[in-house]
């Protein structure tokens, strides 16, 4: 068990190193960051001063080693626009994103999993087709359009809910429902596919032949065996939502990391943009590491095979 966890941890660290290295080198290979910040009309003296301030006048290898050293100590640099540490800035804006992402994922799981199970139990029937259409629609609708339509209906026309910005529970409903649409559709489709496969396995017939209740056979035995790919997609989607749902946050003026990233791009805050990319990579890798560890807990065959 310990060996399995150690192996997954090493894989996570290696993945994270590749991700942060890509963020570092791509930011410099796509153009001169100083020129992007100052614009084409900046003088050479201004470019030299800002390059020295950001440490971009040093050799690339020295910059990279210094970059890794700062990351180990939790230093993500200082925002050019706000004049404060990027990590402090990100942590200040993160609670709103976490609140929105958790609410969206709860909705996605509570709707997507039952919808997928319901479709699998009625495979080939009308209910299965309806569930498939609902899931496909959820994957096809652009989130910015759906958010605007929900605002127009529930905020402008009916006046039931606020149109945006963080506030009470009612202000969370529309952005959370909008953001949950895509992961809900993916969870429903994958649950349906995985459950259909498990329900056709011989052990399910044996369980029912022993007189086990239908709801117990489906809800405990079948769902547990079908859960691994569903947990994978939940983990992937959670990492994506936590690392910044830019479109939804922009539409609803939600004060989260997506809005912060939009402002950083608009203000050409190179340091903050790089910090946000790295932070998103860390969140994504950590969430997927947790999912891998859950695999070993839920299915002993996986950790025994790894050992």
Image (tube, grey):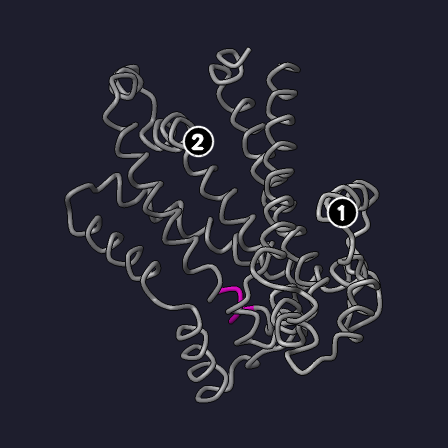
Report the residue that reaches farthest toward the front: 44
The image quarter in which residue 195 lies: top left
* Residue at x 80% of width, y 72% of height: 82
Magenta span has 15? no
Residue beneath disc 2: 228
On the image, the x and y values in percent for residue 250 come to 56, 74
In the rendered view, would you say 232 is above or below 249? above
- Left/right of residue 17 with respect to residue 157 in the rendered view: right
Q: Earlier in the sequence, mark 2 or mark 1?
A: 1
Q: Residue at x 69, y 65 (%)?
A: 270
**As displayed, is residue 294 above or below residue 237?**
above
* SS label for mark 2: helix
Tell me where the magenta segment starts and ends, as one range: 173-177
Up-down relation of residue 37 to residue 307 (above or below): below
**Residue underneath mark 1:** 67
Q: Nearer the viewer, residue 167 or 257?
A: 257
- The residue lying at 60 percent from left, 66 percent from top is 258
The kind of secondary structure element at disc 1 is: helix
């Amino acid at each position: 068990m310990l060996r399995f966890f150690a192996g997954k941890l090493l894989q996570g660290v290696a993945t994270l190193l590749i991700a942060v290295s890509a963020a570092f080198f791509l930011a410099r290979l796509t153009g001169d960051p100083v020129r992007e910040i100052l614009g084409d009309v900046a003088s050479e003296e201004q470019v030299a001063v800002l390059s020295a301030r950001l440490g971009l006048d040093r050799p690339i290898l020295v910059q990279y080693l210094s970059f890794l050293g700062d990351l180990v100590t939790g230093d993500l640099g200082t925002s050019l626009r706000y004049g404060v540490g990027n990590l402090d800035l990100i942590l200040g804006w993160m609670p709103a994103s976490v609140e929105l992402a958790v609410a969206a994922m709860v909705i996605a799981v509570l709707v997507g999993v039952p919808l997928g199970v319901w479709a699998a139990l009625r495979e080939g029937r009308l209910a299965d087709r309806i569930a498939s259409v609902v899931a496909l629609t959820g994957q096809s609708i652009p989130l910015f359009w759906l958010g605007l339509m929900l605002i127009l209906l529930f905020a402008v026309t009916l006046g039931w809910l606020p149109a945006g910005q963080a506030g009470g529970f009612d202000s969370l409903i529309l952005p959370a429902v909008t953001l949950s649409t895509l992961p809900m559709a993916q969870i429903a489709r994958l649950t349906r596919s995985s459950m259909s496969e498990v329900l056709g396995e011989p052990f399910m017939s044996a369980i029912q032949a022993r007189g086990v209740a239908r709801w117990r056979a489906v809800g405990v035995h079948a769902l547990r065996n079908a859960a691994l790919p569903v947990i994978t997609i939940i983990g992937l989607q959670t990492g994506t939502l936590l690392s910044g749902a830019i479109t939804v946050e922009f539409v609803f003026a939600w004060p989260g990391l997506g809005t912060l990233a939009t402002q950083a791009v608009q203000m050409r805050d190179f340091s903050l943009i790089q910090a946000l990319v790295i932070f998103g990579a860390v969140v994504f890798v950590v969430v997927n590491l947790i999912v891998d560890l859950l695999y070993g807990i839920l299915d002993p065959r996986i950790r025994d095979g790894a050992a």
